[in-house]
Image (tube, rainbow, N blue to C red):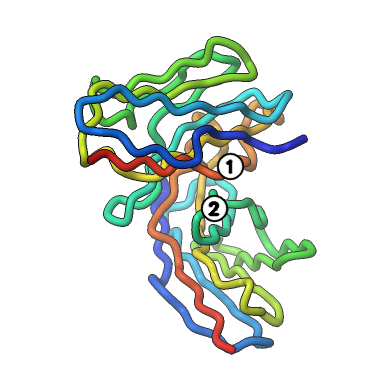
Amino acid sequence: LAKTTQPISMDSYEGQEVNITCSHNNIATNDYITWYQQFPSQGPRFIIQGYKTKVTNEVASLFIPADRKSSTLSLPRVSLSDTAVYYCLVGDGRGANNLFFGTGTRLTVIP
Amino acid sequence: DAGVIQSPRHEVTEMGQEVTLRCKPISGHDYLFWYRQTMMRGLELLIYFNNNVPIDDSGMPEDRFSAKMPNASFSTLKIQPSEPRDSAVYFCASSPHRDRTISEAFFGQGTRLTVV
């Protein structure tokens, strides 16, 4: 399984853009990158998924460089409600190998 | 769809008792997963099913844990006998089947289990 490394925690002020970077140096050719968000007392929620370059949806953007050894989740203009743990997962989706969660990044948004 | 439904939301039991957690996946989803979350170990994948068949139970911690999926709309995770170290939040998740790969997983609200 491709291992991922993320910062344990981050703080940000309301209204700022937040970028959370995930390292996955041994990502395989068929692997794609998925990010989940988990609020306290809730199950994780899918945010975004990508393979290369840039992916954007209504919640976030995902930037993946050409070598794919890292990825950056970008949250535009965060609010207090974005305080959560963000997980980066890597896998090709076969045998549930893209559903192993690491420690995640605890984002705290400050007023 | 109401999403993945788990019951009970909270369970407090005494050590040695049997505990049964229940899950109703999203209709039409082919995959069902059971996770356990603790502060120490984070989110651990315990077992998952494809079309009601257990595929990988390597994450199940001990023989005291068992999971079944008798039909496409129901699964149980049983702990017998329960121990205090089983205290955790247990999540059930389901996922549709797209191009023979598992894409995003949809999680339930979890069952907070406390074994005293």
User: Residue A86 placed where, x, y %?
Assistant: 52, 63
Circle 1 crowding by C-alpha within 10 Å: few under 14, some 14–19, many from 20: many
Q: Is residue A43 above or below residue A65?
A: above
Q: Which residue is mark 1?
A: B107
User: Residue B6 placed where, x, y %?
Assistant: 55, 34
**Label pair 2/1, CB-CB below 8 angstroms:** yes
Image position of B14 (left or right of A19): left
| Residue at 51% in and 13% down | B53
| Residue at 64% in and 42% down | B104
Host chain of mark 1: B
User: Residue B106 placed where, x, y %?
Assistant: 63, 41
Nearest the eye: B65 or A105: B65
User: How many numbered marks have been drawn onto this rendered protein structure?
Assistant: 2
What SS does tag 2 mark? loop
Where does the C terminus of chain B fall, quadrant-wise? top left
What SS does tag 1 mark? strand
Nearest the eye: A107 or B91: B91
| Residue at 38% in and 32% down | B46
Amino acid type, mark 2: Gln
Image position of A90 (left or right of B86): right
Q: Which residue is mark 2?
A: A42
Amino acid type, mark 1: Phe
Quarter holding residue B74: top right
